[in-house]
Amino acid sequence: MYDVVSDLKVVDIDQICLHETHECVRLEKTCQSILTEGVLRNPPLAAQMRDGRYLILDGAHRTCSLQKLGCLRSVVQLVNADFFQLEAWHHVVPDGAWLQELLTDPDLRIEAIPLSAPAVASLVNGEGKELFFYAAKEVNDPSARLRAWHRVVTSYSQNYAVKRVACGEVERPEAGSVLMRYPATTLEELDALVSCGQVMPAGVTRCIVQGRMLNLRVPLDLLTAPVFQEEVWAELCDRWKRSLRLYSEAVYLCEV
């Protein structure tokens, strides 16, 4: 039987990299939740980069919260290349003033018919009408594409409620909302992006993992202690090995 607990790793906080920005409101809620509970309930998912550092694939807000709380280290679950894939989250957003401002942004090129170059985003409204977003200039330049991508996501993410949906989950939004669709990114592309000191917009990368470990409740004290407590860590790993259960059937989880 595969020892999934061996995928857990304690990593110094300065050896962790983020590939995306964060949402301020969500960060405050996550930080307060961790502080109130006194535990890191679910370890972020990470992959080791070519330079040896660890790239967070899922859990940017948890990681930022640990940094904000003064943690010296984090526990991450390393993804196994055979058991994970990267997709994109799409966003359902209420219509509002942000949309008109976005449609007239001089730094964006908006087309009703897609160009040969890949779009940074596409929009579908309640009537099924679709628009495609590109950088206003140099539509194939990676840096220009990334700047345009940030402009699109930032236009609504700071002030409007965003519902994340998986690719194909929503084809046409309800009246009064729009669906923002984004392209998927590979692990190699994320590694190259972060190595250049760049980040993607918040909430667009979706990491799908078989065998994700949840509700481990790593004590905050273990992450903030000046000296890492090896014995405590060993006891936790032993307890998790005895307590973890794998549910192979589909389940419905209420996240209220």
Image: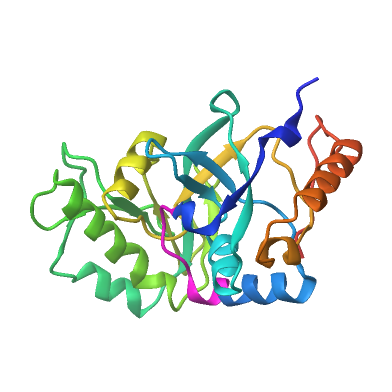
**Coordinates of residue 32 in the picture (x, y in percent):** 67, 77
Q: Is residue 91 above or below residue 56?
A: below
Can residue 157 be seen at all in this image of the molecule?
A: yes
Residue 44 lies left or right of residue 176; in this view the side is: right
Q: In this orientation, which residue lies closer to the viewer: 219 or 37?
A: 219
The quadrant holding residue 52 is top left
Name the image quarter holding the N terminus.
top right
In-front residue for pair 160/25: 25
How many numbered markers are drawn? 0
Q: Is residue 48 magenta?
A: no
Q: Position of residue 133 (x, y in %)?
A: 24, 54
Q: Which residue of the protein is positioned furthest toward the top in this rendering?
A: 1
Q: Indicate whether residue 21 is drawn in magenta.
A: yes
The residue positioned farthest toward the left in the image shown: 137
Residue 255 in picture, x, y percent from top left: 75, 60
Which corner quadrant holds the C terminus? bottom right
**Who's the residue at 18% across and 71% down the image?**
104
- Is 35 left, or right, of 126 in this rendering? right
Left or right: where does residue 141 sit relative to residue 164? left
Quadrant for residue 184, please give it.
top left
Residue 45 x, y percent position in the rendering: 59, 45
- The color scheme shown is rainbow
Does residue 111 appear in this view?
no
Magenta stretch bounds: 18-27
